[in-house]
Image: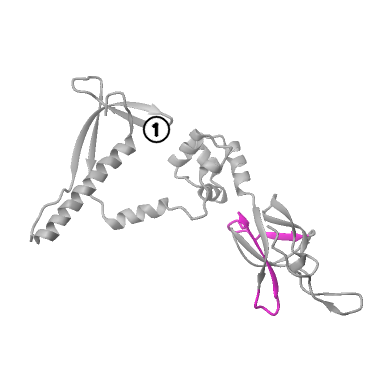
C-alpha cells in the first residue's frame, strides 16, 4: 500500500482477523499431524498502528503513516479470542430473512440516512417496520438525527401491501373446494388481521402471512378488483379474471353448467 491509499477501518480489522484465522488453522493442523501432547496458541495480540485518520462518506478511513512521517494518530488494537457460540449468538442478530428488503430499496432515504440507521442497528425494511410497530420512530429519529416526517413517509411506502399474483389452487376441503392464492408483500402486519374485498364485498381468509393469503371467494367473485388492506389507510388493489376457474354455476333452467375450459392464471 502506498501512502496515498486509504483503507476502511473495518477492512483493516477483517484482514488482520483473516490472517490470524489462517495462523490458528496452521497450528491446529500441526497439532493433529504431529500428535503433540502439548502445543501453544495465541491468546491475545496487541497492535499499535500509526496512521492518518480520514472521514469519507460516513466511513472512517485510515492511511498508514510512512517511515519518519509525523502528525499521525496511534491506534492501539487488542485482538482477543472468541468462541463459536459467541460468534453464532451475535450472527443471529444480523441474520436477514430470505425475502427481507434492504434499506437500499427505500427511495426516500439517502445513502447517508441508511448509514445512520445501520449505526442504530436498523439494517433492513423489516427492522424498520418493527421500529414503527413498537412506536419507536421518534426515538430512532433522535438517535440518528433524521427527520421523523421523512422516516414516517418512507415507512408508509415500504409498509404498504403489494399484490403480485392471484391464482386458483386445488383444495381437498368439501366445504371450500375452490380457493384462490394471493401472493405479494406486506399482506399482513404484526398484530393486525388483513381485510380482503372483491367487488367491494368481504372475502373469507383461510390462512395468511406477510407473503401469502389463501381466500375463498364467492361464486360471483372470480373476476373483478381485489383489494387487500393490511392496516388502516394502507391498501392495494389489483384487477384479475379467474372466471375460467369459477365453480359450476346454475343457469336459468336450473341445470348446472360446468365452467369453461381453464385458461392460464392471470398474474
Q: In the rendered image, which quarter contains the N terminus? A: top left
- Residue at 59% in and 44% down: 155
Rendered location of residue 64, percent (x, y): 26, 27
Residue range corresponding to the magenta coloring: 171-198
Neighbour tally class for label 1: few under 14, some 14-19, many 20 plus, Cα within 10 Å: few
Is residue 75 visible in the rendered structure shown here? Answer: yes
- For the residue pair 246 and 144, the one nearer the viewer reads as 246
Q: Is residue 124 left or right of residue 153?
A: left
The picture quadrant where one finds residue 120 is: top left
Q: Is residue 57 left or right of residue 45?
A: right
Rendered location of residue 48, percent (x, y): 20, 33
Residue 179 part of the magenta segment: yes
Compared with 256, 60 (above or below) is: above
Compared with 167, 144 (above or below) is: above
Q: In the rendered image, which quarter contains the C terminus? A: bottom right
Q: Which residue is mark 1?
A: 59
- Residue at 88% in and 74% down: 251
Rendered location of residue 63, percent (x, y): 29, 27
Residue 264 part of the magenta segment: no
Counting every numbered tag in the picture gives 1
Farthest right residue in view: 253
Rendered location of residue 107, percent (x, y): 58, 38
- Residue at 69% in and 55% down: 229
Secondary structure under tag 1 reads: strand
Q: Is residue 73 left or right of residue 54?
A: left
Is residue 80 visible in the rendered structure shown here? Answer: no
Amino acid at each position: 500500500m502506498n501512502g496515498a491509499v486509504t483503507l476502511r477501518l473495518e477492512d483493516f480489522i477483517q484482514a488482520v482477523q483473516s490472517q490470524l484465522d489462517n495462523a490458528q488453522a496452521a497450528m491446529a493442523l500441526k497439532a493433529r499431524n504431529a500428535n503433540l501432547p502439548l502445543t501453544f496458541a495465541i491468546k491475545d495480540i496487541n497492535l499499535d498502528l500509526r496512521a492518518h485518520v480520514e472521514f469519507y462518506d460516513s466511513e472512517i478511513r485510515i492511511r498508514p503513516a510512512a517511515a519518519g512521517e509525523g502528525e499521525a494518530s496511534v491506534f492501539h488494537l487488542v485482538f482477543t479470542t472468541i468462541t463459536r457460540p459467541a460468534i453464532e449468538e451475535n450472527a443471529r442478530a444480523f441474520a436477514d430473512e430470505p425475502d427481507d428488503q434492504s434499506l437500499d430499496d427505500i427511495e426516500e432515504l439517502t445513502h447517508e440516512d441508511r448509514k445512520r440507521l445501520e449505526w442504530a442497528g436498523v439494517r433492513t425494511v423489516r427492522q424498520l417496520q418493527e421500529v414503527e410497530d413498537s412506536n419507536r420512530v421518534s426515538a430512532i429519529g433522535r438517535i440518528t438525527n433524521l427527520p421523523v416526517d421523512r422516516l414516517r413517509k418512507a415507512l408508509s411506502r415500504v409498509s404498504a401491501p403489494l399484490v403480485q399474483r392471484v391464482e386458483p389452487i386445488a383444495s381437498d376441503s368439501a366445504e371450500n373446494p375452490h380457493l384462490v392464492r394471493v401472493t405479494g408483500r406486506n399482506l399482513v402486519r404484526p398484530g393486525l388481521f388483513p381485510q380482503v374485498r372483491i367487488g367491494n364485498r368481504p372475502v373469507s381468509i383461510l390462512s395468511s402471512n406477510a407473503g401469502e393469503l389463501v381466500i375463498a371467494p364467492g361464486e360471483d367473485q372470480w373476476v373483478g378488483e381485489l383489494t387487500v388492506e393490511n392496516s388502516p389507510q394502507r391498501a392495494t388493489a389489483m384487477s384479475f379474471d379467474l372466471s375460467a376457474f369459477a365453480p359450476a354455476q346454475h343457469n336459468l333452467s336450473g341445470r348446472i353448467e360446468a365452467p369453461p375450459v381453464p385458461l392460464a392464471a392471470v398474474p
